[in-house]
């Protein structure tokens, strides 16, 4: 699996297990050690790479420990301070991280509860950890734009200079995105006044403010919905099979086969969730086949993902027309096995089986 898939698999594990993880130690074992190992690629059982309970005397404080130190070439590069799952991540919780950062060679400090990771460096003053993180990774809502930056901290790539040089931009872009998201969710007066001034010529009175606060919030939600719909429409256009000529295109909308197919599909409703699931599956298998070869057919009882629009080449089925959703995958004899899923991200846990199906049909061609 690539880094995005490993993150998605860990995210699925967190959703399944977070309800039973109650202590810091359990959080380390269930979530944080897998992150260090499977996502970043370091050997958690090799003390030359990962040092648990790292100790370094700091001033008059003796024997203080930080949860993990990641070492490269004999030098501490990353310090990780852990809190229990779902626990708050605040500056007060990072006090030991602050002290250790100044007394070791580490340039990256991480504060985490296993679900959210705050990454810090020393942009504001040398050898002094910043008060604000330059990168926030939330495994419950993974921002794919951060994956390339996270890859720079992995064992195979580790490019500290590159991530430090881009840290300031990451820091401010992240803060701006969160500020914009907050305005979309609950616009404050300055934001409402700014947008109102673009469309309303009158004075910004208390009555106008009250009226436009609701309008700005509603317009923001509709704008986001329109963006999502536009992306889905573009995806649908990408999956359509190209017609070789205008004559064939004209014939296709009048042919008896098309009319019969339309009648056969009466009552079938393709949902956004099914289309999103299809896009995930297509992204997974396109490492072995061209994306345009992966298409879907929706039926009343299931949503099929096929290779070459051939129902004898099923890659997967999405059974989403029920309260418990299932992902159907196929073995070499084309026998379907249904796996219960609660979120679309859990599809990534079956990535290898999906690729194998596509690879098997392609090899047989």
Image: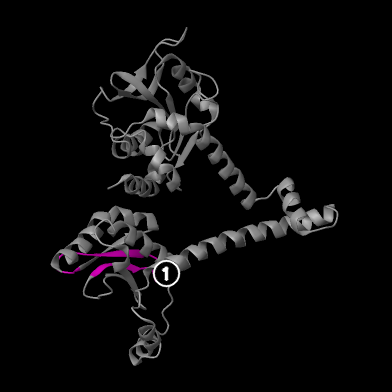
Q: Which residues are magenta?
A: 314-335
- In this rendering, the answer to whether 22 lies above or below 256 is above
Residue 6: percent from the left, percent from the top?
32, 45
Whether residue 303 is visible to the viewer of this picture, yes or no, is no
In the rendered structure, the answer to whether residue 91 lies left or right of residue 75 reads right
Residue 20: percent from the left, percent from the top?
38, 43
- Answer whether residue 77 is magenta in the image: no
Q: Residue furthest top?
A: 60
In the rendered structure, the answer to whether residue 181 lies left or right of residue 79 reads right
Q: Secondary structure at mark 1?
A: helix
Mark 1 burial class by Cα count in 10 Å: few <14, some 14-19, many 20+: some
Q: Quadrant of residue 326?
A: bottom left
Residue carrying label 1: 236
The residue drawn where x is 32% and y is 70% is 295
The residue drawn where x is 39% and y is 67% is 238
- In this rendering, the answer to whether 203 lies above or below 332 is above
Residue 160: percent from the left, percent from the top?
38, 28
Front position in the image: 196 or 334:
196
- In this rendering, the answer to whether 229 lies above or below 34 is below
């Amino acid at each position: 699996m690539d880094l995005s898939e490993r993150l998605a698999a860990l995210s699925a594990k967190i959703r399944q297990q977070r309800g039973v993880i109650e202590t810091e130690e359990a959080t380390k074992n269930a979530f944080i050690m897998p992150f260090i190992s499977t996502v970043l690629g370091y050997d958690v059982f090799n003390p030359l790479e990962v040092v648990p309970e790292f100790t370094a005397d700091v001033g008059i404080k003796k024997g203080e420990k930080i949860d993990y130190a990641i070492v490269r070439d004999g030098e501490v590069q990353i310090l990780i301070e852990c809190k229990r799952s779902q626990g708050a991540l605040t500056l007060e919780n990072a006090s030991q991280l602050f002290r250790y950062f100044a007394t070791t060679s580490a340039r990256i400090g991480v504060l985490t509860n296993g679900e959210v990771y705050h990454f810090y460096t020393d942009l504001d003053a040398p050898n002094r950890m910043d008060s604000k993180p330059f990168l926030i990774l939330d495994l419950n809502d993974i921002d794919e734009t951060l994956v390339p930056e996270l890859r720079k901290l992995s064992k195979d790539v580790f490019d500290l200079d590159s991530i430090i040089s881009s840290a300031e931009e990451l820091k401010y872009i992240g803060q701006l995105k969160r500020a914009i998201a907050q305005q979309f969710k609950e616009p404050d007066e300055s934001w409402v006044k700014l947008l109102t001034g673009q469309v309303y010529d009158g004075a910004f009175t208390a009555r106008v403010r009250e009226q436009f606060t609701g309008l700005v919030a509603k317009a923001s939600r509709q704008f986001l919905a329109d963006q999502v719909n536009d992306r889905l429409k573009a995806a649908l256009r990408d999956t359509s099979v190209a017609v070789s000529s205008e004559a064939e295109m004209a014939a296709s909308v009048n042919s008896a086969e098309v009319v019969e197919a339309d009648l056969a599909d009466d009552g079938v409703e393709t949902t956004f969730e099914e289309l999103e699931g299809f896009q995930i599956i297509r992204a997974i298998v396109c490492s072995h086949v061209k994306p345009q070869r992966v298409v879907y057919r929706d039926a009343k009882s299931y949503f099929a993902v096929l290779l070459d629009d051939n129902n004898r080449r099923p890659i997967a089925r999405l059974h989403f027309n029920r309260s418990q959703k299932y992902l159907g995958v196929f073995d070499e004899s084309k026998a379907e096995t249904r796996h219960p899923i609660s979120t679309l991200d859990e599809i990534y846990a079956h990535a290898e089986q999906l690729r194998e199906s596509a690879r098997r049909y392609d090899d047989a061609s």
